[in-house]
Image (spheres, grey):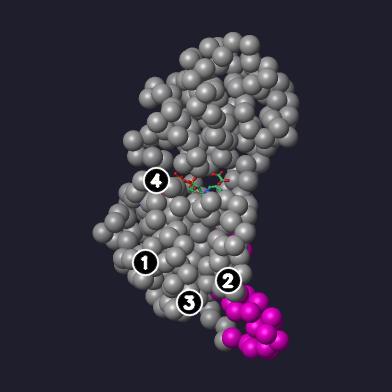
């Protein structure tokens, strides 16, 4: 049983040590060590080249080293190869921390205070109780639900939106395109945590952003491709939106001259909301391989036709 690993070298050293200690029956290999490509059954990668994929004739499963799978060119991946995204505590914990930090930044008007500080203005803003602030999460999957769970103790009025219907205690749940307008109209702070698919590309656009209440703010931790940048800039300039916290852009990194860099109402971070944690991810991968070996459903297997 051979696993080929083609991602970050530092993480690779940690994974190798964990595989050797905890799953010695699975040979852990990097491309430099690969003598027989046809013997590779599992590939753990972020964005494998088409040339590499073409050489792996015995490949059964492609494991993403991250939560997202939009980076893969599905057209280059043979239909029979199963695709699995990464679900591991490090990614979830990182996202929970970032999203809660971003919501509190907006809730406590820290973007306004940053602007006021630059202008040497001492300008207190009346405190709004958390219960009066409506926070909505687009995407009620692994990360969206964890974020909602962590926001709950603050007392925010929580809602969520997903493709299929969910029932989550303390969260008003909406489902499907038909319920998107009512969901958006109840979000003072909107968090985007859907995967990037053909259906969700450009979902944060003029039509949807205009359905947010005046003064609402956006947190995009999904993918840059969700956002129509020009529409966000118009809504910020027209003061329909009050602020945006963006962890993802398209392209990444953002070009030097991009207007987001200097916009006073945009807080930008370089795609660091969460990161795959080496030790917990290695163990999550081993657990998934064991599930596969014993005929159980793997955690995070992607439905390829659905795109996530
Ligand atoms: P999941 O697959 O667990 O959840 C996806 C959610 O989105 C599901 O609730 C799904 O609905 C919903 N969804 C998908 N398509 C649609 C649609 N067309 N309309 C409405 N809802 C839809 O994903 P994760 O929570 O694990 O991750 C979400 C994304 O977060 C990743 O794909 C990645 O892009 C991003 N991410 C960003 C990181 C960062 O550092 N910025 C780090 C990690 C992830 P349903 O429940 O009905 O299936
Ligand atoms: C991921 C990411 O998908 O870091 O894991 O964005």
Disc 1 target residue? 206
Q: Quadrant of ligand 2?
A: top right
Give neighbour class at mark 1: few <14, some 14-19, many 20+ (Cα, 10 Å).
some
Label 2 to label 4: alpha-carbon separation: 28 Å
Apparent side of residue 285 relative to residue 240 in the rendered image (left or right): right
- Element assignment for label 1: helix
Chain-order first, disc 1 or disc 2 = 1
Disc 4 target residue? 197
Which quadrant of the figure has residue 197? top left
Q: Position of residue 56 (x, y in %)?
A: 51, 17
Does the closest atom of ligand 1 sit within 8 Å of the Cβ of label 4?
yes
Q: Which residues are magenta?
A: 97-125
Residue contact between numbered discs 4 and 1, judged by CB atoms under 8 Å: no
- Quadrant in the picture for the C terminus: top left
Give neighbour class at mark 2: few <14, some 14-19, many 20+ (Cα, 10 Å).
some
Label 1 to label 3: alpha-carbon separation: 13 Å
Label 1 to label 2: alpha-carbon separation: 19 Å
């Amino acid at each position: 049983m051979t696993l080929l690993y083609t991602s970050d070298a530092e993480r690779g050293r940690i994974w190798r040590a964990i595989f050797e200690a905890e799953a010695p029956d699975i040979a852990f290999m990097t491309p430099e060590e690969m003598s027989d490509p046809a013997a590779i059954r599992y590939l753990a990668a972020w964005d494998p080249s088409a040339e590499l994929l073409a050489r792996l004739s015995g490949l059964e499963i492609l494991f993403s080293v991250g939560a997202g799978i939009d980076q893969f060119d599905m057209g280059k991946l043979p239909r029979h190869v199963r695709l699995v995204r990464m679900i591991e505590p490090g990614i979830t914990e990182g996202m929970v921390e970032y999203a809660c930090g971003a919501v509190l930044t907006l809730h406590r008007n820290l973007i306004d205070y940053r602007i006021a500080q630059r202008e040497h203005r001492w300008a207190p803003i009346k405190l709004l109780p958390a219960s009066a602030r409506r926070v909505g999460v687009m995407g009620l999957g692994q990360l969206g639900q964890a974020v909602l769970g962590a926001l709950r103790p603050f007392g925010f009025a929580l809602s969520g939106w997903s493709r299929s219907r969910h029932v989550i205690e303390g969260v008003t749940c909406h489902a499907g395109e038909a319920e998107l307008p009512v969901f958006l109209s109840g979000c003072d702070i909107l968090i985007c945590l859907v995967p990037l698919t053909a259906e969700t590309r450009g979902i944060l656009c003029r039509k949807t952003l205009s359905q947010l209440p005046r003064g609402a703010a956006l947190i995009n931790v999904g993918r840059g491709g969700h956002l129509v940048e020009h529409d966000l800039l118009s809504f910020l300039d027209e003061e329909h939106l009050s602020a945006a916290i963006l962890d993802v852009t398209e392209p990444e990194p953002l070009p030097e001259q991009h207007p987001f860099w200097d916009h006073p109402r945009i807080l930008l971070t370089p795609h660091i909301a969460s990161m795959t944690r080496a030790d917990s991810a290695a163990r999550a991968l081993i657990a998934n391989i064991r599930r596969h070996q014993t005929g159980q459903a793997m955690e995070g297997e992607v439905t390829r036709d659905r795109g996530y």
